[in-house]
Image (cartoon, coloured by chain):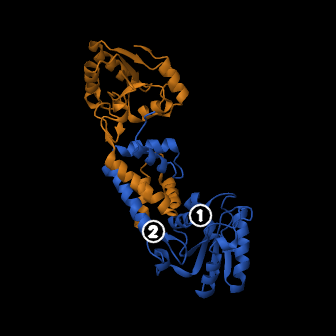
Chain colours: A blue, B orange
């Protein structure tokens, strides 16, 4: 059967790998952008290439940025004694969009999952303990998902951080059970952060 | 506020322009692919660049392909006396996926819309009449959307093609009213094509 060319087929296949785009939407997207190569396709190709070349992980907090340390870690206006621990970079972005946290971040890269085979050594936990011990951190806010794995991770981090004497808090209940921080509205995020409490 | 870098922001903005991806899904997509630049980002950039450079419109039927005439128009196994008229390339792709049409195609590039300001000169109607008159076409199948504009376009094409003496048929009812060909399942497309009738 002759359908469309290899170039189009490959493009559809690659776009269909993006989360949120199935094969059908990828096809519609390709059809739409094929009509305007100068305005959409080439700029998108260029943006992908540049981002792939430029973006790296911040060696201090785990954020994605073009520099390491990242812009947040370098920002002199941020409170350096306050670290907000998140599961992933998407959660960090959500908190930044809500403009509710004036300290730094620490991206764990996941949550502990005994069933999923994710142990403490798979996450950036030792680097967090080291940061807290060496950088004069006063408070660690656990902004982890309200799931079983999130709670497990919170308990584990609290235990690991206890010897450092740092105050450990967690987001107030208000984060829906089972919910992901990344898709929460700014108001809920702000309320949960304001009402954080000692663990 | 320091959120993420310009490179990431530009990528999110460009991806959010794709149909089916809002800003939030674009952000999730970017986060996912930033983690694997070699496996996803660079191949996607390359595929976009190649497709933008290679893909053109078939000067005979209006299909998108890397060559003109396109692979379908060049295929010696296709019945050259049978032309299926579609609104857009997405409809052509849908019919090809269903493997129900063994003839050639003609992409109109839209439907007539008196209210939307789309007149006959905005569509590939004159080229269709010329093809039918010069290429020994025996039957023109109108595979237009089951909308008011689709019906208007069908009536207009029938009038324009009458002097050529070609047989004009249209897809059987079975295409849902208001539906777009592009999102139909293969079975419905096959049934509608089989039961096509003279106009």
Element type where label 2 sits in the image:
loop
**Position of B72 relative to B36 (above/below):** above
Location of residue B22 with respect to A89 vertically, above or below: above
Q: Residue at x 58, y 57 (%)?
A: A183
Q: Position of residue B6 (x, y in %)?
A: 40, 66
Q: Assess disc 1: are there few (<14), some (14-19) or many (≥20) residues with their C-alpha within 10 Å of its C-alpha.
A: many
In percent of the image, x 46 and y 17: which residue is there? B196
* Res. B186 in view: yes
Q: CA distance from mark 1 to mark 2?
A: 27 Å
Going by the image, does A21 lie left or right of A169? Answer: left
Q: Mark number for residue A189?
A: 1
**Residue closer to the observer: A43 or B66:** B66
Q: Chain of mark 1?
A: A
Chain under numbered label 2:
A
Horizontal side of A154 relative to B8 (left or right) equals: right
Q: Residues within 10 Å of mark 2 (few under 14, many from 20)?
A: many
Q: Are marks 1 and 2 in contact (CB under 8 Å)?
A: no
Q: Which mark is residue A172?
A: none
Mark 1 / mark 2, whichever is N-terminal: 2
Residue under numbered circle 2 = A55
In percent of width and height, residue A74 lies at: 47, 79
Q: Number of numbered discs present?
A: 2
């Amino acid at each position: 059967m002759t359908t469309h060319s290899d170039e189009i087929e490959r493009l559809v296949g690659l776009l269909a790998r993006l989360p949120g785009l199935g094969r059908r939407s990828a096809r519609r997207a390709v059809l739409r952008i094929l009509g305007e190569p100068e305005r959409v396709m080439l700029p998108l190709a260029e943006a992908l290439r540049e981002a792939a070349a430029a973006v790296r992980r911040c060696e201090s907090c785990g954020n994605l940025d073009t520099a390491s340390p990242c812009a947040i870690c370098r920002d002199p206006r941020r409170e350096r004694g306050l670290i907000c621990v998140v599961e992933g970079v998407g959660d960090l972005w959500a908190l930044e969009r809500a403009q509710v946290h004036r300290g730094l971040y620490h991206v764990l890269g996941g949550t502990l999952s005994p069933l999923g085979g994710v142990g403490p050594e798979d996450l950036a936990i030792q680097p967090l303990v080291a940061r807290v011990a060496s950088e004069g951190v006063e408070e660690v806010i656990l902004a982890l998902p309200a799931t079983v794995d999130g709670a497990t991770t919170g308990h584990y981090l609290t235990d690991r951080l206890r010897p450092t004497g740092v105050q450990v808090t967690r987001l107030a209940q208000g984060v829906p059970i089972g919910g992901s921080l990344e898709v929460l509205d700014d108001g809920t995020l702000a309320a949960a952060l304001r009402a954080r409490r000692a663990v």
